Image: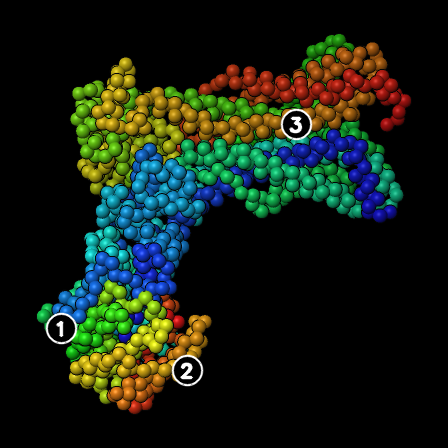
């Protein structure tokens, strides 16, 4: 007998059961799709960071920087060059072109190391227009669109540029940023001649920052991508549940075939190889479909992810996806791995099967008493481990470890709990039909339990993530009300205008709150230091978490500063700690405020303390306190008097609206992934029910024969499905809440640096419950129609046929 | 030697972008372009020292060009080159990065087996490169030509010359044994029949001691060196595409500077015979005749590396031979520059520069 005959015999099973085939391929494809889609989004984002970092030469070369983020005198650069060091100067800063804020990076193309070249030195025209007045901005296509009408400077578009940044000649950067003779860093080329005087002697005040394997952005956004990966993995696991149960069933149903083939002389190894080849074929087909669906999912998700990254981290990611060959490979790899994982148990069972063993599809998957006990023990161990991790482990990965153990443990516990519940209900009931109902449900449980576990995971993730997002939103909006206390925000276009504005406003409004800030480096981190005036607005509204008595007096006197929550947690600061803000500026931490949505550390100091050390700081922006009914008048007189463009005058409501929009956009991706996962779980339940319905005739026929109509049988089927759904949903709620707590109190703190209070939103549960209910009804619909339409002769056959 | 310099990458840029024309019609390295806005050399202007040792930012291009024929105690021959080029994007000077002046340095050491080359490029205005007339100093990065003379004395009479790159370096002490020599008509050096010209003077009488550091060894050397100073705004005619330039130390103590600028016809030659006590005798155009003797494949092109050089009116007839055929300057704009020896009616050593191949 040839191997082809064997293969044909084995494959004929799928021909007779196309639904099973569909379930295997679809489950595998969906699992692969969600996984590779998320991977694709991550890879695209990381590629964007790498491009940005390469273009901004952040990660390839060492730099000389000044401690505390001060500027470096240009003379230091000249001294180093004249000592033979191959170094190149950089002057960076933020500059506003109309409403667009750009990171302006001033470089010197003649000394720039080749690795980081933004300007092609061999292209004479390009070089010349770059260094000659008035100068050229090298920007990304998107940025070029944004600033085209805001500047007279020539623009050159480069695909290598990240959005929101511009390369300019260092001379132009000096003029734009008004920092003549200053540098922000000095790039050290890799090629240096031997025998140089050490940098420590030539520039003792500067530090060498070695090239880091990770760019700042990559570091900052790591938690976000870990988050996405976790979600992708969850979806993958849910998809595998489908594949596992379907393949298991298919193996069991084909036992007679296996037995016949073995009796005809097919060796065990030939059989195993044929089955493996079959599985491999499925994996390839499903993997290909999965990668394509994954690509579609990724292109749907990517704009949302880009918006999130922009909103949360200020990281710019291109919204277009490129199909990389490594996805195909990783997609196939994960599909094959998934298939093997889900079929290994069935294969092993096949290897141990006695040649003449009878097939028992009925008892397939019915976990033995020991099996169930083992599940409960494993669940207890996993739950214990997650508790231990919460208590004793630190870090983001530990946070995800807690989530993983919790979810897996709870889902392993589910069959035992449901079985207990059904047994209990069976004991309570008295009528024969009712008792049969519960007993039959219990009998059905093993076949459904994997699908129900998948459902539990999906529902719990929905409840958990939903609660987290909603809690965050509520807190965020409350926080916005505190934080944006001024009624009107106005920005002057230049310093003389700002002077006139201040003088003019003095008589028109209750108070003028200057918004001044400088970039600094504190404890090795890029930070912002804000200066605030002593004003009741801050005393009454500023969202403080931990404070010292007389906190605002201490800030006003210059003795104390406030730090934001993320910096406070990251550095494990305590109230009363001394903080080095600059080499000649130490201050006491007197309070901590919440600062959501800001990836960076921030410090608030008294305005005098700040401006005495940074007299050059720009004072263009102001918050204005006015009576609400005067806002409109003030607005129009501001634009009449000063000719300020509308973008420069923003009222509180508009600002809040904008922040809220950014927030909502930020969590769109999470919502989308939630829905995908729930969809996969619903599919798992649907396919399980469908397959069970094929096998349930022997159970139903006797009941029918005893006089229960097919209509009533169908109703009982619906009822049973709903009971199982409801029980699973009930189990998902507490699990989801624990999940939310872990997300808020552990994962968020690690990922973003802030801890949020948990709020409970029962209304959202009702909505989720209704969605789940609808899915349940749909999932039971097809099997039910089949039952309702079953000819009595089919039911009668059960008694005639020997299985 | 000299117009050579030219090599300047910048010059090309300047022209291509300022005039919007394409380079081919403008001679080698754009040196044939018009001098709009820049000063133009005029005959009859006397040199003013030490001021003229410094930079002339109103002229488009300028160089401080030094070549040295060196010898180790064991008789091994070496050549060393140190050049600082200035090229202006616009006339005049500004402080800081807005300076329109660009600077380029070339350094090379030639042995019979190797030719080491390095290049430095810098903006003016911030002090990374520049020239000060008194006390004399010319520098780019850590390469330096430093005058050691007291104020009032000839600022170029005593120089310390240093350059260090990844593979090689040198430190040479130069002391002049003769006077500065104006080239052409009292320093007004005509470059074509159409009248293109530059200001040009030389110090061909340096005695050199110093040391070379090479990848495999450090060598103490002595020898002779020649400094060319030249500035202009448009030294070449548009159809001139390159040149051969000879600076020769005759064993008699006399010196000879001669060049031929190639064009579509016969070319334009010019030479100055310098007596052993430093008196220049400018020779009329056409007095110098040069004929290639042998070519070699250098950097993928055929280059005549050995020449027959004749000045019939002086009974001068020699054949030159390079220390190293492969003395190729692989810089932004590449050219051939290396030490030579010559024999014939008189023998001696010198330097040859060839561009536009």
**Chain letter of disc 2?**
B
Q: Which residue is mark 3?
A: A683
The figure's colour scheme reads: rainbow
Q: Which label sits on residue A246?
A: none
Question: Which x, y percent locates residue A605?
Answer: 25, 32
For this rendering, which residue is in front, A509 or A413? A509
Q: Nearer the viewer, residue A494 or A253?
A: A494
SS under mark 1 = loop
Q: Which residue is mark 1?
A: B154
Q: Residue at x 36, y 64 (%)?
A: B25
Relative to B3, A508 lies left or right: left
Q: Give above or below for A188 relative to A487.
A: below
**Which of label 1 and label 2 is nearer to you?**
2
- Compute the Cα span from label 3 to label 1: 95 Å
Residue B237 visible in the displayed image = yes
Q: Is residue A176 above or below residue B23?
A: above
Residue at disc 2, secondary structure: strand
Q: Is residue A503 above or below residue B112?
A: above
- Closer mark to the observer between disc 2 and disc 3: 2
Residue A198 in view (yes/no): no
Residue at image point 41% right, 52% down: A60
Q: Farthest residue in the left direction?
A: B152
* Residue at (32% x, 28% y) in the render: A647
The image position of residue A233, as x and y in percent, is: 57, 35
Q: Mark 3 against mark 1, which lies toward the viewer?
A: 1
Q: Which residue corresponds to mark 2?
A: B294
Question: In which image quadrant can residue A553 be found?
Answer: top left
Name of the residue lying farthest toward the top: A431
**Percent position (x, y) of residue B122?**
28, 59
């Amino acid at each position: 007998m040839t191997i082809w005959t064997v293969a044909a015999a084995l494959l004929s099973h799928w021909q007779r059961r196309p639904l099973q085939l569909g379930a295997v391929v679809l489950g595998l494809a969906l699992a692969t799709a969600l996984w590779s889609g998320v991977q694709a989004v991550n890879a695209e984002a990381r590629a964007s960071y790498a491009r940005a970092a390469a273009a901004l030469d952040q990660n390839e070369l060492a730099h000389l920087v000044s401690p505390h983020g001060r500027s470096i005198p240009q003379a230091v650069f000249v001294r180093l060059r004249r000592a033979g060091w191959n170094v190149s100067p950089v002057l960076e800063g933020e500059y506003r072109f109309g409403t667009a804020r750009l990171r302006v990076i001033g470089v010197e193309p003649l000394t720039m190391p080749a690795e980081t070249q933004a300007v092609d030195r061999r292209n004479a025209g390009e070089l010349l227009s770059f260094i000659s007045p008035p100068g050229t901005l090298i920007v990304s296509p998107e940025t070029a669109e944004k600033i085209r009408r805001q500047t007279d400077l020539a623009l050159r578009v480069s695909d290598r540029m990240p959005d929101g940044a511009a390369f300019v000649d260092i001379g132009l950067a000096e003029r734009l940023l008004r920092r003549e003779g200053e540098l922000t860093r000095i790039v050290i080329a890799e090629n240096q001649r031997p025998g140089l005087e050490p940098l420590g002697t030539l520039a003792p005040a500067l530090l060498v920052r070695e090239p880091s394997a990770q760019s700042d952005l990559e570091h900052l956004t790591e938690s976000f991508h870990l988050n996405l990966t976790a979600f992708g993995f969850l979806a993958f696991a849910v998809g595998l549940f489908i594949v596992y149960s379907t393949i298991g069933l298919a193996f069991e149903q084909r036992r007679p075939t296996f037995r016949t083939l073995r009796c005809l002389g097919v060796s065990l190894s030939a059989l195993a190889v044929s089955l493996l080849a079959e599985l491999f074929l499925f994996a390839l087909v499903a993997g290909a479909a999965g990668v394509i669906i994954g690509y579609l999912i990724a292109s749907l998700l990517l704009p949302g992810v880009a918006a999130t990254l922009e909103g949360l981290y200020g990281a710019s990611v291109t919204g277009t996806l490129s199909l990389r060959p490594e996805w195909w490979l990783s997609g196939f790899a994960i599909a094959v791995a998934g298939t093997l994982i889900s079929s290994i148990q069935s294969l092993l069972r096949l290897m141990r099967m006695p040649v003449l063993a009878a097939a028992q599809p009925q008892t397939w998957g019915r976990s033995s008493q020991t099996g169930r006990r083992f599940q409960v023990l494993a669940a207890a161990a996993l739950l214990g481990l997650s508790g231990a991790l919460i208590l004793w482990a630190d870090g983001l990965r530990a946070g995800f470890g807690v989530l993983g153990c919790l979810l897996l443990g709870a889902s392993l516990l589910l069959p035992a709990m449901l079985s207990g519940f059904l047994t209990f209900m069976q004991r309570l009931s008295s009528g024969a039909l009712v008792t049969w109902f519960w007993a039959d449900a219990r009998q059905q449980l093993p076949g459904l339990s994997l699908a129900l576990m998948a459902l539990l995971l999906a529902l719990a993730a929905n409840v958990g993530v939903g609660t987290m997002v909603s809690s965050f939103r509520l807190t965020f909006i409350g926080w916005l009300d505190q934080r944006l206390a001024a009624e009107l925000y106005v920005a002057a276009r230049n310093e003389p205008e700002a002077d006139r504005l201040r003088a003019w406003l003095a008589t028109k409004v209750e108070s003028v709150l200057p918004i001044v800030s400088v970039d600094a480096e504190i404890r090795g981190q890029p930070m912002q230091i804000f200066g605030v005036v002593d004003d009741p607005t801050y005393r009454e509204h500023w969202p403080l978490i931990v404070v010292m008595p007389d906190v605002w007096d201490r800030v006003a006197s210059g003795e104390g500063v406030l730090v934001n929550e993320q910096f406070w947690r990251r550095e494990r600061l305590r109230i009363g700690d001394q903080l080095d803000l600059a080499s000649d500026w130490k201050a006491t931490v007197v309070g901590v405020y919440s600062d959501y949505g800001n990836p960076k550390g921030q410090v608030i100091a008294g305005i005098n303390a700040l401006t005495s050390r940074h007299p050059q700081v720009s004072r263009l922006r102001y918050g204005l306190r006015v009576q609400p009914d005067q806002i409109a008048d003030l607005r129009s007189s501001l634009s009449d008097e000063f000719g300020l463009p509308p973008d420069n005058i923003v009222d509180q409501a508009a600002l809040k609206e904008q922040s809220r929009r950014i927030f909502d956009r930020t969590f769109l991706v999470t919502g989308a992934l939630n829905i995908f996962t729930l969809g996969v779980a619903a599919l798992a339940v649907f396919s399980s029910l469908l397959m069970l319905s094929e096998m349930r005739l022997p159970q139903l026929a006797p009941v029918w024969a005893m006089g229960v109509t097919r209509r009533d049988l169908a109703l009982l089927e619906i009822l049973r499905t709903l009971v199982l759904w409801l029980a699973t949903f009930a189990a998902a709620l507490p699990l989801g809440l624990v999940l939310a707590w872990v997300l808020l109190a552990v994962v968020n703190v690690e990922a973003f640096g802030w801890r949020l209070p948990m709020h409970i939103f029962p209304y959202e549960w009702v909505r989720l419950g209704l969605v789940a209910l609808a899915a349940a009804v749909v999932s039971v619909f097809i099997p039910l129609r089949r039952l309702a339409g079953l000819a009595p002769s089919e039911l009668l056959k059960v008694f005639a046929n020997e299985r | 030697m000299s117009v050579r310099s030219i090599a300047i990458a910048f010059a090309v840029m300047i022209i291509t972008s300022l005039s919007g024309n394409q380079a081919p019609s403008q001679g080698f390295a754009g040196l044939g372009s018009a001098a709009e806005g820049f000063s133009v050399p005029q005959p009859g202007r006397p040199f003013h020292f030490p001021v003229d040792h410094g930079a002339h930012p109103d002229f488009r291009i300028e160089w401080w060009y030094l070549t040295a024929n060196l010898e180790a105690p064991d008789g091994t021959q070496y050549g060393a080159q140190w050049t600082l080029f200035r090229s202006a994007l616009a006339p005049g000077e500004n402080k800081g990065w807005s300076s329109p002046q660009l600077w380029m340095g070339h350094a090379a050491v030639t042995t019979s087996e190797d030719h080491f080359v390095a290049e430095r490029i810098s903006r003016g205005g911030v002090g990374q490169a520049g020239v000060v007339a008194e006390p004399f100093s010319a520098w780019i990065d850590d390469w330096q030509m430093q005058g050691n003379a007291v104020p009032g004395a000839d600022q170029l009479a005593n120089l310390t010359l240093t350059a260090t790159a990844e593979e090689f370096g040198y430190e040479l002490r130069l002391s002049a044994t003769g006077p500065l020599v104006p080239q052409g008509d009292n320093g007004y050096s005509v470059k074509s029949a159409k009248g293109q010209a530059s200001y040009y003077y030389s110090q061909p009488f340096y005695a050199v001691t110093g040391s070379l550091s090479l990848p495999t060894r450090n060598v103490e050397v002595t020898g002779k060196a020649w400094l060319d100073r030249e500035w202009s705004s448009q030294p070449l005619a548009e159809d001139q595409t390159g040149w051969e330039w000879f600076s020769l130390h005759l064993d008699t103590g006399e010196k000879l500077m001669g060049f031929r600028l190639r064009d579509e016809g016969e070319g334009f030659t010019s030479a100055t015979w310098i007596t052993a006590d430093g008196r220049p005798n400018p020779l009329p155009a056409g007095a110098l005749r040069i004929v290639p003797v042998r070519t070699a494949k250098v950097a993928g092109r055929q280059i005549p590396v050995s020449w027959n050089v004749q000045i019939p009116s002086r009974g001068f007839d020699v054949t030159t031979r390079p220390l190293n055929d492969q003395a190729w300057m692989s810089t932004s704009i590449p050219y051939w520059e290396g030490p030579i020896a010559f024999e014939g009616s008189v023998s001696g050593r010198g330097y040859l520069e060839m561009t536009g191949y």
